[in-house]
Image (cartoon, rainbow, N blue to C red):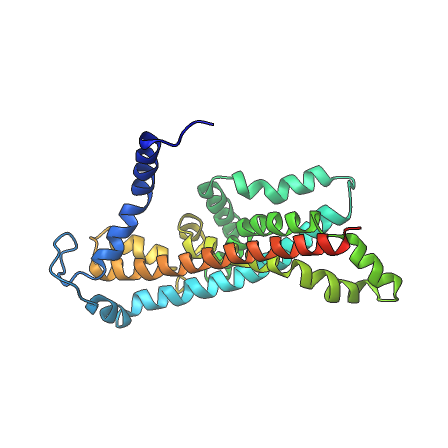
Amino acid sequence: MKRFGAFHIAVLVAGFAFLYVPILLVVIYSFNASRLVTVWAGFSTQWYAALLNNSQLLDAARVSLMVAAVSATIATVLGTLVAIVLVRFGRFRGRLVFSSLVYAPLVMPEVITGLSLLLLYVAVAFDRGFWTVTLAHVTFTLSFVAIVVQSRLISFDRSLEEAAQDLGCPPAETFFRITLPIILPALIAGWLLAFTLSLDDLVIASFTSGPGATTLPIQIYSAVRLGVSPEINAASTILIGLVTLAVIAFSLATKRSEVERQRAERRTAP
């Protein structure tokens, strides 16, 4: 095994610095007392207080949270059904086409997805607003949820369901009392992942949002084009905090799912 030397450490530090120093600067300058974002004038939380009086940013944040919550919930339900079909129904006719269509948004450029959805909404005369951007977010977050739940279902021990049904438990009750609690961490992880992706999205939302449905990334991008203000740094810091919490929760849910899977395997091992 090659030794992990000073050169490797330097490359690793440089890589992390390239990724996270810009984010750290945004967080630091959100506490800058000066209105000039590049001139440090002391520590202050005044821009967070000013942010509470910025109705445009608050409305955009409210819309983003509502869109993320609703789209993540719908994507979790549909993604779970997709994962069940792909894992439990074997190699049915058209399975390859079905799975390709489901996972296509993973590799599709966001600008293409946004433009195609915009053309669809125009073609069917669907006025753009809250539901158009919500449905757009469902289309690309559903794939991520399906992958997370499918990976859990593949390792699921079917003997637990068979034992419940042998004892007289109907299939639907078996699903809600046996299957659902076991795969629940994967569902939570999928929901959090979909919520984070929706909260961060700018490209697709810029094509599909309408009057009264401006999301926070769109509002921040529009404001930055006129100049970076400390309030934007404060709003970005809050958004970074929310995404960080969601990623941590996702990691913990994934780790818990893996621990429960290993425990279930040890219980059923001969």
In the rendered structure, the answer to whether residue 27 lies left or right of residue 246 reads left
Residue 80 is left or right of residue 36, and the answer is: right
Give x and y (percent) for residue 66: 46, 66
Viewer-side residue, 101 vs 90: 90
Residue at 40%, 57% in the rendered image: 244
Find residue 259 and report its horizontal and vertical position in percent: 61, 55
- Report whether 60 appears left or right of 1: left
Q: Is residue 210 visible?
A: no
Q: Residue at x 39, y 65 (%)?
A: 212
Q: Residue 45's x, y, as percent?
A: 21, 68
With respect to residue 6, does 149 lie above or below?
Answer: below
Q: Is residue 146 above or below residue 91?
A: below
Which residue is drawn at the image coordinates 61% and 52% (left, top)? 258
Where's residue 233, x and y in %?
A: 25, 58
Q: Which one is nearer the viewer's eye here, 190 or 3? A: 3
Q: Residue at x 64, y 57 (%)?
A: 260
